[in-house]
Amino acid sequence: MKTPGTVKTKVVGINHVALEVGDIEAALAFYGRLFEFKLRGRHKKMAFIDLGDQFIALSEPRTQQPDTHRHFGLVVDDREPLRQAVEDAGGRILPGRGLDFLDPWGNHVQVVEYRSIQFSKTGAVLRGMDLAGADVMAKTDDAVGQLRDKGLIGD
């Protein structure tokens, strides 16, 4: 028998991340130089960029100081071409062994590759993103082990 207060809601995932920017048009141009994306919709002070079955909400104006430790992680198919594109677009690469950068408004973005992490998309979502069967979508042994250890995939 369950007692009141013992039932907890399970988190299923993240639907979207909201980023404050100084200018919506400039933000769409900046992120458009870095990533292929589909504009989901927009309002006067907001724009929504699809990321498969999730999205980023861009909102103006920027009211916070640049982020140093607080960040969000984006998952990409291949991060190597992104490094130069960030610099060319006006972003600032942060020191470290991975790929972290600040956008022109101070949003801290950490970029990881799909193959290296336990995060996974369904076949239907990958097909919808034109990524099904792509070699870069194959998981590393470490990522597969993490998924297996959590019971998220079979043997």
Image (spheres, rainbow, N blue to C red):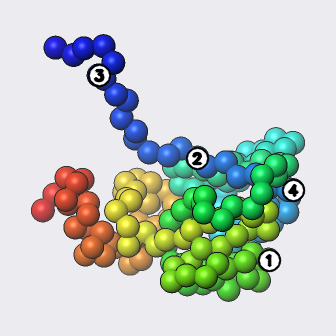
Q: What number is the disc on residue 16?
A: 2
Q: Which residue is mark 1?
A: 90
Q: For mark 2, does the 10 Å Cα neighbourhood hold few (<14), some (14 to 19), or many (20 or more) residues?
A: some
Q: For mark 4, does the 10 Å Cα neighbourhood hold few (<14), some (14 to 19), or many (20 or more) residues?
A: some
Distance from label 4 to label 1 (Cα)? 14 Å
Q: Which residue is mark 4?
A: 23
Of labels 3 and 4, the one closer to you? 3
Q: Quadrant of the N terminus?
A: top left
Amino acid type of the residue tagged 3 in the rendering: Thr
In the foreground, 138 or 108: 108
Element under disc 4? loop
Element under disc 3? loop
Q: Earlier in the sequence, mark 3 or mark 1?
A: 3
Q: Which residue is mark 3?
A: 6
Amino acid type of the residue tagged 2 in the rendering: His
Amino acid type of the residue tagged 4 in the rendering: Asp
Q: Earlier in the sequence, mark 3 or mark 2?
A: 3
Q: Is residue 101 left or right of residue 116?
A: right
Q: Earlier in the sequence, mark 4 or mark 1?
A: 4
User: Can residue 34 be seen at all in this image of the molecule?
Assistant: yes
Amino acid type of the residue tagged 1 in the rendering: Gly
Q: Earlier in the sequence, mark 4 or mark 2?
A: 2
